[in-house]
Image (spheres, helix red, strand yellow):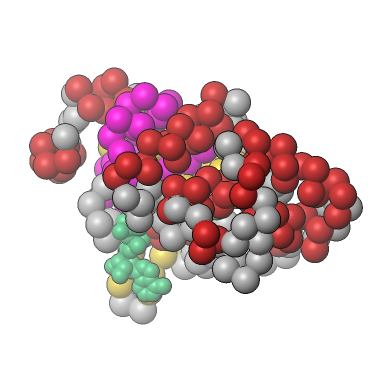
Amino acid sequence: MIIVKDLHKKFENNHVLRGVNYHVHQGEKVVVIGPSGSGKSTFLRCMNLLETPTSGEIWVDGVNITDTKTDIDKVRQHLGMVFQNFNLFDNLTIMNNITLSPIKLRLMSKEEASENALKLLERVGLTEKADAYPSQLSGGQKQRVAIVRSLAMNPRVMLFDEPTSALDPEMVGEVLDVMKGLADSGMTMVVVTHEMGFAREVGTKVLFMDEGVIMEENTPQEFFNHPKSPRLQEFLSKVL
Ligand code: ADP
Ligand code: MG
């Protein structure tokens, strides 16, 4: 589904990604953990070209998205992304937040998009918020809407960048539950998170990113019970 080949990213003299290689297969839930500043967000953002790689290749579903001839808007339609800070449009209702892109890109009629949005809102228990504005929602509710908004585009892959890091603790669970439901439905997911319980329970693979490379990769069981590199051992001793 996603192939990353020798990906490098520099910001001026800051060599942030230093040769990342990885394959995400269909249906996998890849969880990425690692210290702050190790390049996790940059890695995710390169996957849908929110950042332009300095060198290397990224293939999504058989398309080389790093080829300048590729229509990136088309690629992005199939890659949902959820951010730490929700990124909802504050001046639009929840309904209009969800239907904006499908209507604008002419993927659906207004009626179809609205019907689909209501189904999605029902799935995350927020039907009654369709006509509310983001400011009237809690952080957890906003993040559930942000997930639903991505799903409205029928993505083949969902990318999550610390989706629960900005939430009050009591709201983390409701967002993780939605993500678990999505995982169970077969969605291919790449999730940057500090939620180790989620990594263990939902991850099919866990990656440790450190200083711009994937330093270690394993099944959750092996990753947490038998970390190999001293850096990962040290990291886990701090977060577990
Ligand atoms: P992480 O998500 O693991 O905390 P990031 O990918 O956000 O790490 O950042 C890795 C490094 O890249 C940091 O040194 C950060 O300052 C730098 N960086 C990230 N985005 C930009 C940007 N848009 N411009 C300049 N430097 C950036
Ligand atoms: Mg980050």
Indicate the position of residue 5 as horizontal and vertical percent values: 49, 49
Residue at (35% x, 55% y) in the render: 166
Nearest the viewer among 161 and 171 is 171
Residue at (26% x, 22% y) in the render: 222
How many numbered discs, if any? 0
Indicate the position of residue 185 as horizontal and vertical percent values: 60, 26
Residue at (29% x, 45% y) in the render: 169
Res 36 seen here: yes
Residue at (81% x, 58% y) in the render: 103
What span is colored magenta in the figure? 189-215
230 displayed left or right of 16: left
Q: With respect to residue 64, does 183 lie above or below?
A: above
Residue 196 lies in the magenta-colored region: yes
214 displayed left or right of 25: left
Nearest the viewer among 178 and 45 is 178
Quadrant where the C terminus is found in the figure: top left
Nearest the viewer among 139 and 44 is 139
Residue 63 lies in the magenta-colored region: no
Quadrant where the N terminus is found in the figure: top right
Indicate the position of residue 52 as horizontal and vertical percent values: 52, 67
Going by the picture, which residue comes out furthest to the bottom?
12
Res 209 seen here: no
Q: Quadrant of residue 154?
A: top right
If the picture is divided into quarters, which one holds ligand 1? bottom left
Nearest the viewer among 226 and 197 is 197
